[in-house]
Image (cartoon, rainbow, N blue to C red):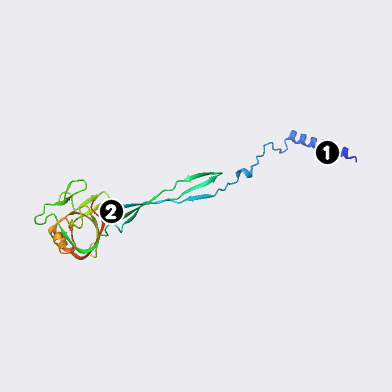
Amino acid sequence: MNICLLKTLSKWLEVIFISTVSLFNFGYDSKEEIIENDVINKNSYVEVDVIDYDTLYVYDASKPNTHEEVITEGVNGASYKNGDDDVTLSESVTEVIEKGTGKTGVYTGMLTGYGPDCVGCSGNVACPTREKTVHNLISDGIYYKDSEYGRVRILSADHREFPCGTIVEITNRDLHKELGIVLDTGSGMRKAYDEGWILIDLAFENEEDLWHVTNKNTTFKVQRWGW
């Protein structure tokens, strides 16, 4: 059969088939097919550079030289290259570390106690508070609310060694651990200091509570010197 005739016949058959399908609607789907572009949807990878945080040291003469505290945690930042430009994803945060430069302030001595109802006592402590007020052990209690250390027990000590406002951590096997603030003094503390040893009094609500407190092997660790 002639090749040209076959091609012509094929075209006519194709036309007849499409017409028949369209006429009787034999399952022909005229909906457009959406073809996703895989290239467009692929992830782009960039190399991220870490920005190391800086460290800043601040020095405090009121803190013992054993003191070191992180005030602000350091956080690394991040950036990446966009052509010739550096694009910052996140800024680094400088780490701030506080270091003490004061004297060490660790002692072993005797702990005793006293109450505001002792002979000759008025209840008023010897030191003015940070707020420049007079603290009274009877009306205000045996604790003081410090702006830095919170609720701390009132202590009596020699002010030549422990200035007003000094924060002391007290530890012994009976008391375990107590955080106190030097707001008072007494003749017994001054006499002990003159003789070369440390005596600190811990405030109680009354003299009846003192029977268990005396300990000759107490550790006094200064956390802050004065106000």
| Residue furthest out toward the left | 120
- The residue wearing badge 2 is 61
Is 159 on the left or on the right of 85, as rendered?
Answer: left
Q: Position of residue 27 (x, y in %)?
A: 71, 39
> Label for residue 20?
none
- Residue at image position (77%, 36%) is 18
Towards the viewer: 116 or 226: 226
* Three-letter amino acid code at the position of disc 2: Ala
- Residue at image position (51%, 45%) is 86
- Residue at image position (82%, 36%) is 11
* Three-letter amino acid code at the position of disc 1: Ser
- The residue wearing badge 1 is 10
Kindly indicate the quadrant of the structure image that contains residue 118. bottom left
Q: Position of residue 107 (x, y in %)?
A: 23, 62
**Above or below — where is 17 with respect to 140?**
above
Asked if the residue under mark 1 is in contact with the one under mark 2, i.e. CB atoms within 8 Å, the reply is no
Q: Position of residue 223 (x, y in %)?
A: 27, 56
Question: Mark 2 Cα within 10 Å, few/some/many (few <14, many 20+)?
Answer: few
Is 201 on the left or on the right of 24, as rendered?
Answer: left
Q: Is residue 137 visible?
A: no
Is 189 on the left or on the right of 93, as rendered?
Answer: left
Q: Secondary structure at mark 2?
A: strand
2 or 1: mark nearer the eye = 2
Q: Position of residue 106 (x, y in %)?
A: 25, 61
